[in-house]
Structure formats: structure tokens, C-alpha cells
Amino acid sequence: MEIKEQLLGNWTSVMETYEFYEENGSKIHPDQISSDINYKLEIGPNTIKAVEVGESPVESEYEFHQDLLDCYLVVFVGTETQIQKIKLFGNNLIMISEVDDMRYQQDGVWKTAYKSIYSIEFSRN
């Protein structure tokens, strides 16, 4: 079964992780890990519906792309385009995105990271 077909279905969030980096690529802050999240995904052949409990669902179109090593979802949310690298391990899905200029708190002070990596892990319903 192709990877795109394996993505189809309903997913529930398990954990999210933030990693923060300096411009030279060195990690500047310990990972922030949270299992206190509650997202649901419904992935269809051309659309993805994301629901955070207590919020209105957001349905968007997406394109699936695959190169020799990696797979990506390009998700169109209104006028914004989000690129999500995906990893699929049986009934677990990890979506990874890079974010510039994300803020984090260290020693009670808010700082800005040059680059951040946000990962969210889902389990198939």
C-alpha cells in the first residue's frame, strides 16, 4: 500500500515537541514536550480536517509529495501554505514543520529562536 493511502483515516494526537536552534544550528534550549494536547485529524484523499477540542474544525486541501527519502504534505489553509514533513510508522504518524522566529521562555525571559522544529505525533483511531 502506498504511503498516501496509509495516511487516510482518523488520527488523534499523542504528543507535541518543540526544538529551538541558533543560526549556527546548535540547540539553544531543552526540548519542550507536551502530552496535554487534544487534536484530531481526518485525512481524506484531497482534504485534511483538523480539530482542536473546543475549537471549530479547519478543513483544508492538501497535496502529497514524495522524494527519494522524505514525504511531505503541502496544506493550503486560507492564503497560507504549510509544509509538513511526515513520518509514518504503522499506526503512528509524525508531522514535522520548521518555524522561524518562534519564542520560548528560558530562565523567566522570553527569547526568540532562529529556527524551531515543531513535531506532533498522532495515533490512528
Image: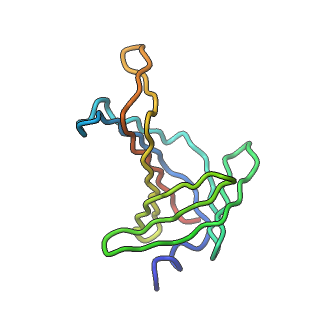
Q: Is residue 86 left or right of residue 125?
A: left
User: Against 76, is 89 above or below?
Assistant: below
The image position of residue 76, as x and y in percent, is 62, 59
The image position of residue 39, as x and y in percent, is 61, 50
| Colour basis | rainbow
On the rendered image, what quadrant is the C terminus found in? bottom right
Give 4 or 12, whichever is nearer the viewer: 4
Q: Which residue lies at the image location 31% right of the left edge and 75% below the top edge?
A: 68
Q: Of all residues shown, which one is farthest toward the bottom?
A: 1
Q: Quadrant of residue 48?
A: bottom right
The image position of residue 59, as x and y in percent, is 71, 59
The image position of residue 21, as x and y in percent, is 31, 36
Q: Is residue 56 left or right of residue 105?
A: right
User: Against 111, is 94 above or below?
Assistant: below
Q: Which residue lies at the image location 38% right of the left edge and 31% below the top edge?
A: 113
Give 83 or 39, whichever is nearer the viewer: 83
